[in-house]
């Protein structure tokens, strides 16, 4: 059985030290609103599949205070 193209698991992982620079650069380049910096405490994550970055995730404490802006 050839498993070279068998599906694997996509796993999120926290971004640490050096990849943060890559995460920031990719987000600046590809986010539809742009990206300058995080506001408040933040957790950056990357969804990986076979070692390749598929998605960038950002969780920020400031997002809890956006309701007035969104209204």
Image (spheres, helix red, strand yellow):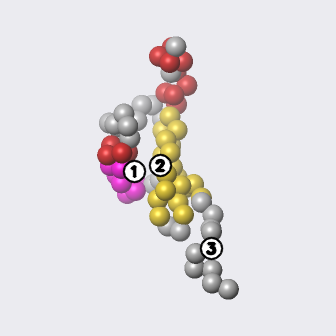
**Towards the viewer: 58 or 5:** 5
Residue hosting label 3: 6
Secondary structure type for disc 2: strand
Question: Up-down: is 14 above or below 67?
Answer: below
* 1 vs 3, front mark: 3
Q: Position of residue 44 (x, y in %)?
A: 48, 46
Q: Which residue is rendered at x = 59% and y = 60% of the image?
A: 10
Q: Position of residue 45 (x, y in %)?
A: 51, 49
**Dots 1 and 2: beta carbons under 8 Å?**
yes
Q: Earlier in the sequence, mark 1 or mark 2?
A: 1
Question: Up-down: is 25 above or below 67?
Answer: below
Q: Which residue is rendered at x = 52% and y = 21% of the image?
A: 65
Secondary structure type for disc 3: loop
User: Label 1 neighbourhood size at 10 Å, few (<14), some (14-19), many (20+)?
Assistant: many
Task: Give the overall secondary structure of the magenta segment.
Answer: helix
Residue hosting label 2: 56
**Dots 2 and 3: beta carbons under 8 Å?**
no
**Dots 1 and 3: beta carbons under 8 Å?**
no
Residue hosting label 1: 23
Q: Position of residue 56 (x, y in %)?
A: 47, 49
**Towards the viewer: 56 or 30:** 30
Q: Which residue is rendered at x = 36% and y = 45% of the image?
A: 30
Q: CA distance from mark 1 to mark 3?
A: 27 Å
């Amino acid at each position: 059985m050839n498993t070279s193209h068998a599906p694997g698991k996509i796993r999120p992982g926290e971004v640490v030290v050096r990849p943060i620079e890559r995460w920031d650069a990719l987000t600046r380049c590809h986010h539809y609103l742009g990206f300058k910096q995080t506001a408040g405490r933040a957790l950056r994550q990357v969804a990986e599949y076979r070692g390749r970055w598929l998605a960038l995730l950002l969780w920020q404490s400031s997002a809890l205070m956006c309701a007035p802006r969104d209204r």
